[in-house]
Image: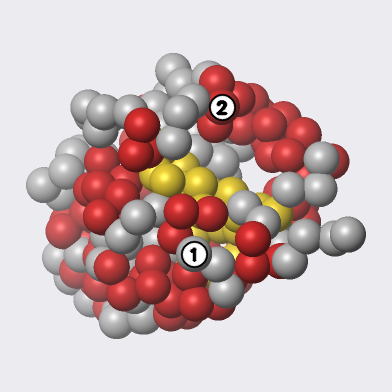
Amino acid sequence: MARNDSSRRWYLFDYGNVVSTSPTPEDWEQLAEATGVANLQASTSTYWQHRHAYDAGALTSDEYWSLVCGQRVGAVRSGWLDILDDNQWSHPNLETLDVLEDLDARGERLALLSNMPAAMVSQFIDAPWTSLFQRLFFSSSLRLVKPSPAIFHHVLTELAVEPDLVTFVDDSPANVAAALSLGIDARLFAPSSDLSRLLSAPAAAERPFPRA
């Protein structure tokens, strides 16, 4: 007898630094040259200060890049900056893709939950890797951003599954903590992580919270 879909596990993955690798120093240098702003990769830079609002769909590309650059940026230049930004987040983590393909071949249910601005979504939506996921959730479309509990509640409702039947993989300790607080089996991913081993580790309730 086939299992009821509501009793089957979902594997929910973040995109940046999980499916993709981090931007290279050369990527950041190219974006810095185009914006005229140095050290954009720093957590205190204007790139990150306004990223939450951009990921949430609260800012247009023109508005976001104007804030990053500290001066008005028109549609043509902001479109170019979006392309550079898309490119630097498009480097695939090949080891992650191998694991995803294996999970897909086994018939597991895969979903993506990413904080991602609309301009980037439009570029990535038809990328080959998206075919591995049955459901795609993007912050800019939902107007919700991790680690808000609301975005996880939305995903759980859409997947029609209980929290303990979702294994969530993310590189942000804050996002992992938020998911754990809702009863989701959340796993903290790092560049050195062996994803297969991470997924086969004991459930969250049976192991200590991972340190950053």
User: Taking 126 as reference, is 63 above or below it?
Assistant: below
Query: Label 1 vs label 2: CA separation?
Result: 20 Å
Residue 150 appears in view: yes
**Badge 1 or badge 2: first in the primary sequence:** 1
Label 1 Cα crowd, 10 Å radius (few <14 / some 14-19 / many 20+): some
Instruction: Please state the horizontal and vertical placement of residue 20, each as a whole percent of the image.
Output: 54, 39
In screen coordinates, is 123 left or right of 60? right
Mark on residue 162?
1
The secondary structure type at the circle numbered 1 is loop
The way the protein has been coloured in the rendering is secondary structure
Mark on residue 62?
none
Which of the 4 image quadrants contains residue 65?
bottom left
Q: How many numbered marks have been drawn onto this rendered protein structure? A: 2
The amino acid on which the numbered mark 1 sits, given as a three-letter code, is Glu
In the picture, which quadrant includes the C terminus?
top left
Q: Residue at x 36, y 80 (%)?
A: 143
